[in-house]
Amino acid sequence: MNVRKMSLEKLELLSYADIAYELLKLDKKSKTTPALFGEVCSLLELSEEQMMELIGDFYTTLTTDQRFVLLDTAEWDLKDNHSVKTIVDDEDEEEDEEETAEIEEPEGTEDEAVTGNEENYDDDEEEDDLSDLAILTEDEMEEE
C-alpha cells in the first residue's frame, strides 16, 4: 500500500505508527523521529504546532511497537530489515560451571554449616536472657 497516494480520508483511518511503517517500507531507509513524523504529519496535513504537540506520543508509540527498531544512529527502521545475532560463548559457560563447583560443600560438613561455630556459643548467656520472661494468661493480659 502506497500511503503517499492514499486520500486524506483513508489516511486518517490509519494510526501514525501504521503510516510510519508504510513510509519506512516504501523508502527502504531509516529516518530520525522528527523526519519520520514530519512526513506523517505532512500526509495528514497537520500543522507544525500539532506536530510538536504529538511528537512525544509518536516516539513512545514507536518504542512500544514491535515492528520498529531504534538504531545506534538515532534513526528508526523496520525490525524486519535487521536480524538479531546470538553469540554463545562456551568459555563463559565453562567458567560458570567451575564457579558452581567451588561453592558446593564437601560431604560431612552439613552440621557445621547449620550450627555455626560452636566454640563461641555460650549456653548460659541464653538462659540469662530468658530468665526475665514470664507467661501470662489472657485474664492477666486484659488487666494490663
Image (spheres, rainbow, N blue to C red):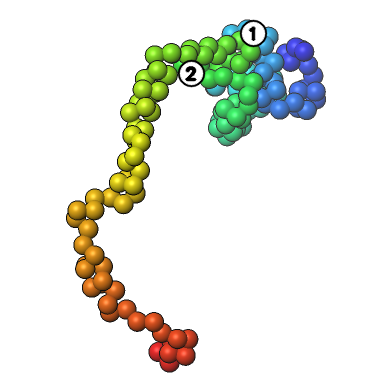
Which residue is at 24% across, 50% downward?
Answer: 117
- Of helix, strand and loop, which one carries label 2? loop
In the rendered image, the residue lying farthest to the top is 28
In the rendered image, the residue lying farthest to the left is 120
In the rendered image, the residue lying farthest to the bottom is 143
> Which corner quadrant holds the N terminus?
top right
Q: Are marks 2 and 1 in contact (CB under 8 Å)?
A: no
Which labelled disc corresponds to residue 27? 1
**Is 70 positioned to the left or the right of 61 in the image?**
left
Which residue is at 57% across, 27% downward?
Answer: 63
Q: Position of residue 106 (x, y in %)?
A: 33, 34
- Name the residue beneath numbered marker 2: 74
Whether residue 63 is visible here, answered yes or no, is: yes
Amino acid found under the numbered disc labelled 1? Asp
Tell me which corner region of the image, top left, top right, bottom left or bottom right, holds residue 99: top left
Whether residue 58 is visible here, answered yes or no, is: no
**Is 39 positioned to the left or the right of 129 in the image?**
right
Amino acid found under the numbered disc labelled 2? Ala
